[in-house]
Image (spheres, rainbow, N blue to C red):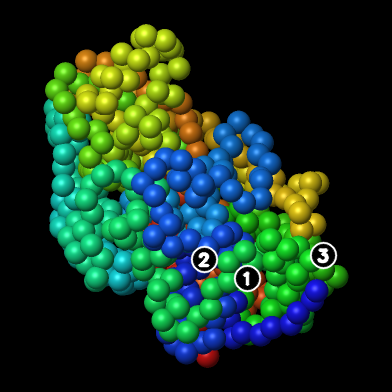
Amino acid sequence: MKLEERADVIVVGSGATGSHMAARLAEAGKEVLILEAGPERNLSSLVSSPIWSRRLKWSGPPVEESGDHPVGQVFNSGYGVGGSAMHHFAVWPRFHENDFTVHSDEGLGLDWPISYDDLRPWYDKVQAECGISGDARGEVWRPAGDDYPMAPVPVFAQGAAIAEGFHQLDMQTSALPLAVTSSPYKGRTACIWDGWCDAGCPIGALANPLTIHLPIAIAAGASLRANATVRRMLVKNGRATAVEVVDTNDPSMVRTVHADVVVLAAFTVQNARILLASASDEHPYGLGNRHDQVGRYLMTHVAAPVFGLFEQKTTPHLGATGGQLLNQQHYDDKQAFRDQGAFGSYQWMIAQAMKPTDLLGIAPSRADLFGQALEEFMQRSAKHFGMMAGVIEDLPLVENRVMLSELKDQFGMPLAHCAHSASAETRALFDAAINEGRRVFEAAGAVEVWSGGPGPMHIMGGTIMGDNEKTSVTNSFGQVHGIPNLVICGPSLFPTSGGVNPTFTAHALTARSADKLLNAN
């Protein structure tokens, strides 16, 4: 069955940036329709359980992966209303000034078409709206900006134990900026610090689409349709005109929804996939892909986990999943370890809340143990465990990309294939960070120290912004080159990854793009 519909604006995806854009445009009086491929979700359906968190992540169309450092689509993406922001760790630092000028400053990577100063007002606006707990003055590395609206998160025994190692090495720590309520904020209850952020936070203390922008959008008149898979977008004479939508549960039900503006906010891999799958006679290589840029410069931060056991009890189950403390000691010197062949920025997220049954897992980090030794290790870990994770910058490489697979999904749409390998400089930075992290734990007095291998953390790039359509997919406002009413949102716009979590910056870019759209009409 084929049906025809119309809205002023179609937003593809109900995650962090899609819900944000929908809220801004609906508040301005636009008729907005949000299309979400996955199922409906609400706060009452969330459960503080690692089994639930798997449901939030490990769903949706499969993605083929290749290369020596896969991006980890099944772990890092989301599916259903709220998208990946439903299980994100809410670590919200800002990009630094030099993240926007990497190529100009260092001769590696890419430059952004905007500067930190261009984005600062939007950082300030977003943090006031969504709420961040932190200590701006304590973050001596932080670029200029307004103070956080809430006091920093508490430091529990695990954070205090690891912080001592930093202090012994004359390295500073500060409160980790978290989009989590350290006190009641704008009708949201305060966090109870039970460490289940990645399971969706049923009490609403975590800033996610269900607690922030979706209620605003719906109250302003936006419509949300779950189980609505966008198969392709339609473009005519340089304008996006409609999207073709399939009922996820009934592939025979196909709708063509017409709109004046189409916003693509389906997260990194799916953004590129939909553009490529929307090829037509007018755009034979896909939308925005006249110069073969769609899908390129795919990036994922390299996670650098360091673990330890302490003699004292560390209460590792308390806190937020993202951590308690932050260190960005070497962040602004991207060549701090050039003698080791390394390049890039990194940060430490210190003292993540950890349960013995948590998805991040204590036992998987010690594959050398089994039987009685593993049981004894788990018993000690439940009370004496400590961990921190480095976020390692991933250099943008043109050969790392999203492509269309030869395989198709149930709707006849080609699946995505992600090819990603880490550069030698990125791998060297991982090694340098791991060595530093082990020294921190040793200085903290840990009785046992070990580290994990490089893992994928966050997914960025693939539809990068830039001033030149020959080397980018969109302009600085996310408008696809040659198709100005097709707007992309999310970390797929990032030309570089920086060494910090991307969600805050993605929100700031979205707020800026929304303002541009509204002022243009």
Q: Nearer the viewer, residue 402 or 408?
A: 408
The residue at which mark 3 appears reads as 284
| Residue 188 position by quadrant | bottom left
- CA distance for labels 2 and 1: 20 Å
Looking at the rendered structure, the kind of residue marked 1 is: Val
Q: From this viewpoint, which residue is outermost toward the front?
A: 44
Q: For this view, does 188 lie left or right of residue 273?
A: left
Mark 2 crowd level (few <14, some 14–19, many ≥20, 10 Å Cα): many
Q: What label does residue 265 carry, if any?
A: none
Q: Choose the circle earlier in sequence order: 2 or 3.
A: 2
The residue at which mark 2 appears reads as 14
Disc 1 is placed on an element classified as strand
Q: Is residue 198 above or below residue 162?
A: below
The answer to whether residue 166 is seen in the rendering is no
- CA distance for labels 1 and 3: 16 Å
The answer to whether residue 19 is seen in the rendering is yes
x and y, in percent, of residue 206 in the image: 32, 57
x and y, in percent, of residue 362 in the image: 37, 26
Q: Choose the circle earlier in sequence order: 2 or 1.
A: 2
The residue at which mark 1 appears reads as 480
Q: From this viewpoint, which residue is outermost toward the top?
A: 372
Total marks drawn? Answer: 3
Looking at the rendered structure, the kind of residue marked 2 is: Ser
